[in-house]
Amino acid sequence: MTAQDTGSVEDLAARLRPGFTLGVAAAAFQIEGSVTADGRGPSGWDAFAQKPGAIVDADSPTIACDHYNRADEDVTLMQELGIDSYRFSLSWPRIQPGGKGGINRRGLDFYDRLIDKLLAAGISPMATLFHWDTPLELEHAGGWMNRDTAERFAVYCSAAAERFGDRVEHWVTMNEPVSVTLQGYALGVHAPGRQLLFDALPAAHHQLLGHGLAVRALREAGVKGQIGISNMHSPVRPASNSLSDRLMAQSFDVLLNRIYADAVLLGQYPRPPLPMKPWFRSLGTVRDGDLELISQPLDFYGLNYYYPIKVAAGRGPAEIPTGTAVEMTKVPFHLAAYQEYETTGFGWPVAPEHLAVLLREMKDRYGDALPPVYITEGGASFPEPSHVDGPIRDHNRISYLAEHLGHALTATGPGGIAEDVELRGYYVWTLLDNFEWAAGYSQRFGLVHVDFDTLERTPKDSFYWFRALERARHREP
Ligand code: BGC
């Protein structure tokens, strides 16, 4: 793909509908550092990151981008970028160190200042209440396998709502519960490192319950902002038309997409293909009233889209790096490669047309139950040097973003395949190169390069491209 295929910034800007939000997204644990400076408690991720072999190159998240101490500089960068909105996450253990009991005023103060700085810079705050940093004490008590964590989460959400409810314009209850369930509890490649395979599904239900309780807590607190959730979704296709490939793809679609979206939007769990029913047994932890809570109406639905998935029957090896967890070799299917696409630094296929497919699929599945949609994350890592001295010509990232945004706009515009989806915005993952979970600092997703020795920030060409897009759209015709 060349930058030429993506068309001009002016053309793309002209297609942005009035009021369409352009933003960047980030997560507390990946950028903040300052693990204990203000009384923040440890999270499951702090503990996991210390396990030998858990993180590429044994990278430590202790300092990350040092955003905690450099928030002013980072908001200035965002202002320079010209974005409409910033999606960030509140760290639960910074606000409530043990996950229960006392609230840490200094933790609340940090976000209070951040929100005020954003508003003063004309940037609308979108706050995510949970982006994977479960307080360690709760993780020791079973984490999201324990129903009690959902109840605890609601208490912390009430404290956040009380303090920030007058200024946060969009609330995201949870980020990608599917990733926590699969990577964290089923496969063990993310915190807390459990390898429960299909027995991990109670973690899905309890996160969804946490979402429902959070929605109720925010509404009871009378927050002024809109409320939604961010789920990662990928269209899932069978590797061939064989019955076994189709059954495995359908099952993986249930695991990856439907458990979350069906519960939130339809108030029910999906039916897996009959022969695979026993795999989903552990979802039976549902109590009366849970699904009503989980499916309360939302103001928006956040979609995180990175790449499509192809599933083949038969045990591994996975043909794409995301599926290479050792535990994956124990299940009777594997992720197959999309040969026709180029790949990102992570080895993920670059397939922007599948974002349009996903939007169509969401509407087909959920109809009027689908509220207005924000793409709350999309972006790509590419190999880039640790230290830079001069411009960073990341035209692959510019193409990635232009193509994905372009396909989303075409699909949801007049005559598009998903014109009945109300798409309200696109958030780039992410502003700064950061701690990319198990990949440590080896995968760079930022519009801004970070030198992890000096913490110096250097805008990449993609930063200037995104800025040009914002400027072009506000220019008088
Ligand atoms: C997560 C981010 C992560 C990104 C890239 C998303 O699934 O929400 O935290 O950095 O993917 O891996």
Image (tube, grey):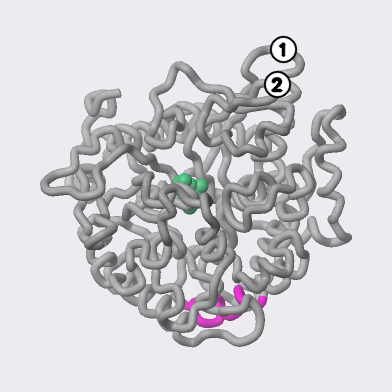
In the depicted view, which residue is nearer to us: 94 or 462?
Answer: 94
Q: Given the current orientation, which residue lies at the most extreme left position?
A: 390
Disc 2 is placed on an element classified as strand
In the depicted view, which residue is nearer to us: 89 or 369?
Answer: 89
Mark 2 closeness class: few <14, some 14–19, many ≥20 residues within 10 Å: many
Q: Is residue 242 magenta?
A: no
Residue 187 vs residue 473: left or right?
A: right
The correct choice, above or below, for 338 with respect to 322 in the image is: above
Q: Given the current orientation, which residue lies at the most extreme front position?
A: 52
Q: CA distance from mark 2 to mark 1?
A: 9 Å
Q: For mark 1, what is the residue? A: 242
Bounds of the magenta span? 155-166
The disc, 2 or 1, on the residue closer to the chain's N-terminal end is: 1
Disc 1 is placed on an element classified as loop
| Amino acid type for the residue under numbered disc 2 | Ala
The correct choice, above or below, for 319 with respect to 30 in the image is: above
Image disc number at residue 313: 2
Residue at (32, 55) in percent of width and height: 432
- Answer whether labels 2 and 1 touch (C-beta < 8 Å): yes
Residue 132 placement: quadrant = bottom right
Q: Is residue 157 magenta?
A: yes
Residue 200 vs residue 48: left or right?
A: right
Q: Position of residue 473 (x, y in %)?
A: 24, 46
